[in-house]
């Protein structure tokens, strides 16, 4: 979500051709390991598996709000929405997690904003007593429904991202974010706070997509529906990061704002198996 421009808080204060994939059917089978990436045969361990199947949010892992529950935020003064836990809901009939933007005013930090959005986070240090999740290096995959505005544009500001505990020093990976109606990906660090390294995929239209980021020592590579769309190799953090899923409204692209819902079927994090991965710095914790 371009934390530099959306999440302007710091924790103290290429178009690409893309293969289209139908939404995965709901199952409770063990997820299959990801396909071979960049030509390397890798044995994978599934270290995080959040399946949203209509049974509610696992609050030991996810917090429905930004550093708290109820009405929280905004993360950045350019947002036109507060976050509300009421906008985070499980779908009936074993459906996905819904993160909804409504055109209803909400008040947070003493300011009334014209919209209300939704966010969930695995940050283990957001005020919770136990739980959460963070990791260093690995392949994050998420099955996402990107909401539409007037057909082919992306509505609002949906985002799948990972953040470190001391932004921007330890990074921000925007795996997917809707910027002005287009899907984009960027990595932000102290050297590239406001623009980030990355790009946008103007061929990707709203609907169901599988997005991924393979974070390795010194690089992040992004994939949309199994196709590589970009890579960042400069000043990529080695600090642990946590997962954020959000749907909000940006005043810089209010022209695509509408009541709409971002949906999440599942989120997974894989890491290479074996002692070599530990030696390279791969880790995770709950």
Image: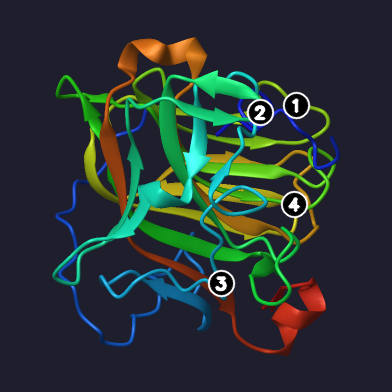
Q: Nearer the viewer, mark 2 or mark 4?
A: 4
Q: Is residue 60 left or right of residue 148?
A: right
The count of marks equals 4
Q: Residue at x 40, y 13 (%)?
A: 254
Judged from the image, the secondary structure of the residue bearing numbered disc 2 is loop
- First in sequence: mark 2 or mark 4? 4
Inter-mark Cα distance, 1 to 3: 30 Å
Inter-mark Cα distance, 4 to 3: 16 Å
| Up-down relation of residue 103 to residue 40 (above or below) | above
In percent of width and height, residue 11 lies at 80, 42
Q: Nearer the viewer, mark 4 or mark 3?
A: 3
- First in sequence: mark 1 or mark 3? 3
- First in sequence: mark 4 or mark 1? 4
> Which image quarter holds the N terminus?
top right
Q: Is residue 156 left or right of residue 246?
A: left
Q: Which residue is labeled 2 in the image? A: 196
Q: Which residue is labeled 3 in the image? A: 61
Kindly check if marks 1 and 2 are in contact, taking CB atoms under 8 A apart as contact. yes
* Residue 235: quarter of image: top right
Q: Residues within 10 Å of mark 1 (few under 14, many from 20)?
A: some
In percent of width and height, residue 259 lies at 27, 29
Judged from the image, the secondary structure of the residue bearing numbered disc 3 is loop
Observer-nearest of 27 and 16: 27
Q: Which residue is labeled 4 in the image? A: 164
- First in sequence: mark 4 or mark 3? 3
Kindly check if marks 2 and 4 are in contact, taking CB atoms under 8 A apart as contact. no
In percent of width and height, residue 146 lies at 29, 40
């Amino acid at each position: 979500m371009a934390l530099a421009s959306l999440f302007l808080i710091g924790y103290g204060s290429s178009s690409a051709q893309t293969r289209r994939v139908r939404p995965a059917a709901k199952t409770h089978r063990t997820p299959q390991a990801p396909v071979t990436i960049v030509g390397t045969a890798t044995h994978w361990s599934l270290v995080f598996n959040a399946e949203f199947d209509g049974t509610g949010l696992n609050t030991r892992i996810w917090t429905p709000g930004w550093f708290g529950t109820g009405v929280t935020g905004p993360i950045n003064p350019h947002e036109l929405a507060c976050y509300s836990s009421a906008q985070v809901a499980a779908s009936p009939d074993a459906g996905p997690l819904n993160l909804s933007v409504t055109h209803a005013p909400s008040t947070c930090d003493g300011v009334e904003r014209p919209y209300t959005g939704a966010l969930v986070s695995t940050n283990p240090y957001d005020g919770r007593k136990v739980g959460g999740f963070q990791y260093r290096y690995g392949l994050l995959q998420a099955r996402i429904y990107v909401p539409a505005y007037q057909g082919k544009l992306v509505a609002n500001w949906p985002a799948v991202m990972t953040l470190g505990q001391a932004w921007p020093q330890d990074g921000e990976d925007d795996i997917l974010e809707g910027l002005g109606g287009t899907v984009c990906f960027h990595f932000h660090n102290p050297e590239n706070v406001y623009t980030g390294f990355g790009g946008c995929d103007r061929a990707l239209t709203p609907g169901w997509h599988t997005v991924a980021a393979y974070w390795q020592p010194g690089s992040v590579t992004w994939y949309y529906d199994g196709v590589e769309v970009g890579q960042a190799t400069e000043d990529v953090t080695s600090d642990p990061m946590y997962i954020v899923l959000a749907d909000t409204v940006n005043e810089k692209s209010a022209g695509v704002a509408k009541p709409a819902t971002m949906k999440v079927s599942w989120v997974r994090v894989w890491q290479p198996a074996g002692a070599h991965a530990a030696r390279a710095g791969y880790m995770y914790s709950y």
